[in-house]
Amino acid sequence: MSTLCRVVLSIAIGTLVCTWAASVPAQEGDSSASVRRVRGIIQKDETWSGTVIVTDDLTIDGAKVTILPGTIVEFADRRKRHGPTLTVGGWNKGFRGYLEILSEPDRPVVFRTRAGSQPGRLVVNVRGETTSASFHSKNPREKPPPPKKTPGRVVWEHVRFEGLGEVESKQVMKKQILVARPAITFKVAGGAHTLSLTHCTFDRSTRVKISAADGSRISLLDNLFTNETERVALEIAGVRGQPPPDLALVSRNRFSCAISLESISVQLTDNILIGPYVAVAVNALPKSDVRITGNYVHNTSMNDDGRYALNCEYAGAVIENNIFRGGSTCVLNGSRLMTGNVMIGAPRLEVEITLPTIKTPTNGASSKNNPRTPRTVLRSSKTHRLVAALPSGSLFERNLLLGPAHSLLAPQPRLVPRDGEDRTPHHKQATILRNNLLDGFGASNRGIHLGSAGRRAQPIGIHGNVFLRINSVVLVEDDGNGATIEFGVNAAAPPPARVIHRVGSKDAADGPGLTIVEKDVASFYLVGIPPERVPDFDADIQSGKLTTGTLRNRLFESYRPREGSPLIVKHNGAKSTLGPGTGNRE
């Protein structure tokens, strides 16, 4: 039986616009047996329902497309090297288009790539309306009022995106590298526009990229990112040369890959990131407002290849009440204010080392004349540092650092300043390490590692900290820089092999005011301490049995001093507690 088709042809800007409505079998999962195919340019308002198949590049220009609940939009083009792109509007001011998605929790709108087709993608330009009021005047000199500008709004809820974006291999400098095209690109500039994504799912797709400027407002709440094709799930960045966006809110989302935040003010709160590629990477402009609070970030990779849970290259960020776990370095760069956080190292990382193997001579000849063949071995390592660097003038207070790691805390400043604030007199201010607890679990070489070759010296204050099961409390590599260290009252248990180990300095003094309360670990605490191998909390966090705040408080409570503990000391006639105390600091 022949298929009956109705074909509507129109010519617009030299482009053929085709719309088919055909009675063809629907793919499994289609909500309707009627399938509509679209491509080209849409210049009149439309409403989509049922199943809509994008067979080639499609642009919404000067029109509004409304998608009804339960609609499935499929990208299905097998001929081209790249899959189809659905573009909403344009980057210039006169090129506008609008996409309204009326999705519902039990009838979501789904964007997906059809099996066997090249992955599709979306490019959404968020634009507002400019309207001119009617003007009538008998006075020829009277000017008409300026046109009224209404900011644009893109508010999407309960939308699913499946299998969008693609990763291709390109040759750069004789090396093959993987280059990803974003699954969805949002361009939010030209006004104080609004972009809000809530309860959306991004499954088996590449990154969601948001370029924002001009006071635009970005909000991502309760979304799920289960990416498998790229290592970055979300990228939000300002636009170079344009005014920055307003504060972006990224809260209560779940990620299986990394987040990249660049040149924006952002509030990153209560997110869950679990997976071998998860990380939070932040860089911002001077005087930005960056707050990273209440997040659970667990890089589950067991490869010693330089991965991390957090890299904050903006010194002015506020980082508090988070849990960071795993990676070769748990926190690669911290900020000037870090308080109430938990850092947990990863034991038994796998590192590949290629060693030369000399063949044993069989005829009595010297082994020097025998060729060497490479031999790859796997060795067990552990997290290098829980915190690898802090900016000068930092306050690092009431944090838990749980090993194992080669060094738990290394507060030396960065070799190269990353933002304008680092060039101010902050480097002359002391970095204060106060009321932290560092537990090496008997598998950490040193608690605090100060100074290294090539880094400028900075004043350091070490007060009220507790060091547990660590071989050397403080390792100092002056390297001729003459770092100034001020010690207060600190505690260590069991008594360490070395309290202060100075390298490269003739001055072997421990510093003014140093007091170490050396006791048994058992005499410090009422509740007890976690086992040497910290349990895996991921399943409880993902299922909702545990929240990040509850887990953090539980870990802090494990180190709460009991009554009469030597951690409760008198100082200037008043009682004070060494270490971070309890974890209820929300």
Image (tube, rainbow, N blue to C red):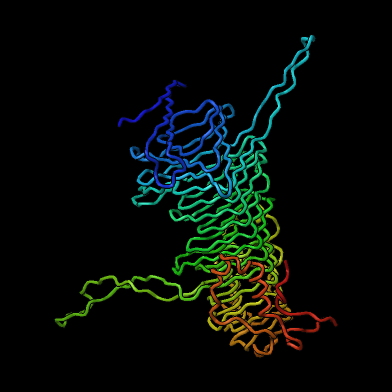
Foreground residue, 461 or 64? Answer: 64
Residue ID at (50%, 58%): 257
Asked if residue 383 can be seen in this view, the reply is yes
Residue ID at (44%, 26%): 17
**Quarter of the rendering containing residue 304:** bottom left
Is 20 situated left or right of 359 in this image? right
In the image, residue 405 sits, relative to residue 162, either above or below, namely: below
Residue ID at (57%, 44%): 103
Residue ID at (79%, 9%): 138
Query: Residue 316 at what x, y percent from top left?
Result: 67, 57
In the image, residue 38 sits, relative to residue 472, either above or below, namely: above
Foreground residue, 523 or 496? Answer: 523
**Quarter of the rendering containing residue 144:** top right
Query: Residue 313 at what x, y percent from top left?
Result: 60, 57
Query: Residue 84 at what x, y percent from top left?
Result: 42, 38
Is 120 situated left or right of 461 in this image? left
In the image, residue 183 sits, relative to residue 450, either above or below, namely: above
Query: Residue 12 at what x, y percent from top left?
Result: 46, 21
